[in-house]
Amino acid sequence: MSGTRVDCPSGAPAVMTPRRWLRLLVWSAAGMVLALVVVCAYALVYPERMPPAVGSIVEEITGANPHPVHLMSPQNAPLSAVALLGKQIFFDPSLSASGTQSCASCHSPQHSYAPDNAFPVQLGGAHMNQAGYRPPPSLTYLYRQAPFSIGPDQGDTDVPVDMTQLASQAAGVQRAQKTALAAPAAPAMVPQGGLFWDGRADTLQIQAIGPLMNPVEMANATQEDVARKLLQTKYLDQFKQIFGAGIVNNPSLLISEAMFAVGRYQTEDQSFHAFTSKYDYWLEGKARLTHAELHGLQLFNDKDKANCAGCHLSQPSKDGLPPVFTDTQYEALGVPRNPAIPANRDPKFFDMGVCGPFRDDMTKETQYCGMFLTPTLRNVAERKVFFHNGVYHDLKQVMDFYNLRNTAPEKIYPRDASGKVQKYNDLPAQYHANVDVADAPFDRKFGDQPAMTDRDIQDIIAFMKTLSDGYKAAGS
């Protein structure tokens, strides 16, 4: 082979032999690799200066966030005297009828303030033999939760909001379609805010009193019972020092201030909102995500695929507040009935969330039956049960539900005696229209290709594992 004749700059002829071609290709490739290394190195030092297109390439190769942000997380400061009192109350089992159950019994600090077991519901009562109705949700990341409302943000107002009137006005109005990275077109059309699975408590103080009086939890018969127990505690002197000696003569005020203290503990103690996940550090440019985690994040945000971020907001706010991975709104998902809950042995019993049976102010607003609060996904990989009825026990089961509920419901729901699939079997038939069928991945029809492949699901789970607190970033 004689090679290809070319003209040199000097005008002298030259021949490009195969060896010269190979040398040229090697040097070209080396130059490209060197340029890429320089770009990546520059991106790691000055990621904020990267153009979007280059930043995307760098993100894929290095796993670094090409556009890091500064997150405005709560400051870690010593607890106030009130919060320290609340901490003692939180861990005190003597305030229960059984003498063995405290707030921490169902909200373990070692398990993101959720239960430390995989039971769908917890046991309580005076003899610790009464089963609950719902799995206790985590108490983390509630510090930004607004009061329960329906309709536009009311802001600061001195006029009481008529919830029934607002709910009635919303009846018959098409629900807002929710997509990732975009605000709902009409967010006023769904309930939002509040605490517990059904939003019936508006403050941490009100929430704290609930378990004390619940017959299947701490099971005090009256508030006087609670006050009497508080008067016998070893920290009574702290009550007197903080609230005045006269508080011992006012049972209702004593309980109110005790629950206020519990709320202050949850607000001030950083363990309730640590923001120390790998994702937090990645947002700030202090950690790198793996290829699987990055792909999972893309799918999580993809409005046509997983669309998780349609409800579990993943982006920092405009003022730099870190995402809490919930829009604090309510959804009817139609999860299957959990036969492991004792109450469900009664075929006439249905837990319908916002419209009952544990809150009675919204029972006539049937357009909200079956809706439950969207929980935060922070520390989701540490949980042992999922959804309001604890029907699933791992994230793969959860993702399969989202993926197959409409496309292959026979894989999600049981069949009746005739072999018919009992879709939405944990909600009375007259309320099935409340179930979300508009938002991806629920917008698929029976027999359609599911929105996600098994590999997609594995990568989404890999990303969700980056939401667990306690990650040790280099230099942190």
Image (cartoon, helix red, strand yellow):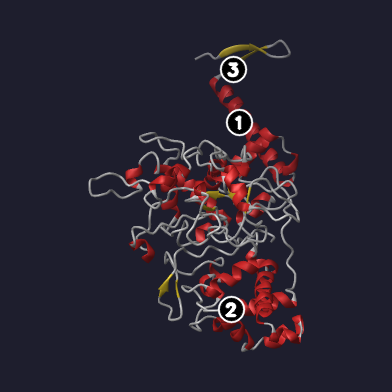
| Mark 1: few/some/many CA within 10 Å (<14, 14-19, 20+) | few
Question: Residue under circle 2?
Answer: 223
Q: Specify the amino acid type for callout 2.
A: Gln
Secondary element under disc 1, as helix, strand or loop, is: helix
**Could you say where residue 195 lies in the image, as x and y percent from the top left?**
59, 60
Of 216 and 471, nearer the camera is 216
Disc ID at residue 29: 1
Residue displayed at 48% across by 74% down: 215
Would residue 325 be visible to someone looking at this image? Answer: no
Question: Residue under circle 3?
Answer: 16
Query: Disc 1 or 2, which lies upstream in sequence?
Result: 1
Measure how far apart labels 3 and 1 are at the Cα level: 18 Å
Image-based side of 123 in relation to 112, left or right = left
Image-based side of 87 in relation to 220, left or right = right
Q: Are marks 3 and 2 in contact (CB under 8 Å)?
A: no
Residue displayed at 60% across by 11% down: 5
| Mark 3: few/some/many CA within 10 Å (<14, 14-19, 20+) | some
Q: Specify the amino acid type for callout 1.
A: Ala
Query: Disc 3 or 1, which lies upstream in sequence?
Result: 3
